[in-house]
Image (cartoon, helix red, strand yellow):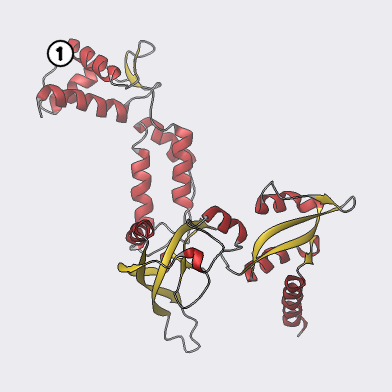
Amino acid sequence: MQPSKMKTLLIYEYLKKHSDDEHPVSSTELIKMLNENGIKAERKSIYSDIDALNEIGCDIITVRSPQRGYAMVSRDFQIPEVRLLIDAVSSAGFITPKKTEELISKLEGLLSENQVKQLHSQVNCKNMNKCDNEEIYYVIDSLDKAITQKKQVKFVYKRRNVDKENKKRYTEKTFIVSPYSLIWNDDHYYLVCNKSKYDNLLNLRLDRMKKISITDEPCRPIESFTEYHGEFDSALYKSKAFNMFGGENMKIKIKCSLKIQEEVLDRFGSGIPLKAVDTDHFETQADVYVSDGLVSWIMQFGADIEVLEPKSLADMILERAKAISAVYST
């Protein structure tokens, strides 16, 4: 690369890393930096480089007080945006500790070094349950390609084992499935897929997968065994599935206490109907997958939710309540 072109790029990188509107960089500092990189420069040539950078869209201003210099004031991401991204990476359980550090370092590169110091003093988001599967990034990439290519995938699925003799800690099973979508839910990444001998959708955690490969076999058409046609609607699926449990798609009708109205709206969306029953209760309806996950979600509210329809769901809750009562009655 010609020295003149390298000079402009070096100035750009230096201003990106070391300057912001509160911390300008002087011409003297830029000349010193260029000399350390084997490029001799005069003050006038610095002005030309700054003008050239501004012409291609870099927002570099001249600061005259209290310290004279140049500052890059416009960036693709601002401090609050980077903070949100770093918090998300830090708290995501499916990202390994090693990859967490790498991603945070890359995100910090979007800001100046002085802006990064502000993040270090304010961001404190640790997750003790980080994934230890370093293959997960290869798994995500492979699944993304397989979904795009509509090909089946093969992988080993690892589960923690409860062994009464405390000898076998894990069990491993090989899966061949048709992948349809990746969904992030409750701090885990899931693959929504199908095993060909079953007419249902299966949700598998990515952090438990390893040794993944894309096969030559085409995916099973999702419309052949579900209500979806053409493309899988991951947003609709997630709204119906509780704790990523699948089940029969049914319309449920529930009676709720007004004090949990916000929780119900957060879960089902603001578009659900709300019908007042009395001064303390309302009724609503929603299309969901009836499953153990749904039962658990309803039971967390105790007597503040009553299932009116279907009776089969009400029976599931009654049986769960009896089982819990039996545990504490003995």
Image coords of residue 174 (percent x, y):
37, 77
User: As drawn, which residue projects farthest toward the bottom?
Assistant: 165
Query: Which residue is at a point 47% across and 80% down the rendered structure image?
Result: 161
On the picture, is 220 further left or further right than 319? left
Residue 43, by quadrant, is top left
| Residue type indicated by callout 1 | Glu
Query: Where residue 171 appears, x then y in whole percent?
Result: 42, 80
Figure check: 194 above or below 103 = below
- Quadrant holding the C terminus: bottom right
Placement of the N terminus among the 4 image quadrants: top left
Q: Nearer the viewer, residue 230 or 244?
A: 230
Q: Secondary structure at mark 1?
A: loop
Q: Residue at 49%, 57% (x, y): give it.
A: 232
What is the crowding at mark 1: few (fewer than 14 residues within 10 Å), some, or many (at least 20)? Answer: few
Vertical placement of 121 versus 237: above or below? above
The image quarter in which residue 170 lies: bottom left
> Relative to residue 25, is residue 312 drawn left or right?
right
* Position of 266 relative to 61 (above/below): below
Residue 284 versus residue 301: which sits nearer the camera?
Answer: 284
x 78%, y 49%: residue: 274
- Give x and y (percent) for residue 33: 19, 25
Q: Nearer the viewer, residue 257 or 162?
A: 257
Callout count: 1
Q: Residue at x 45, y 50 (%)?
A: 90
* Residue that mark 1 sits on: 42
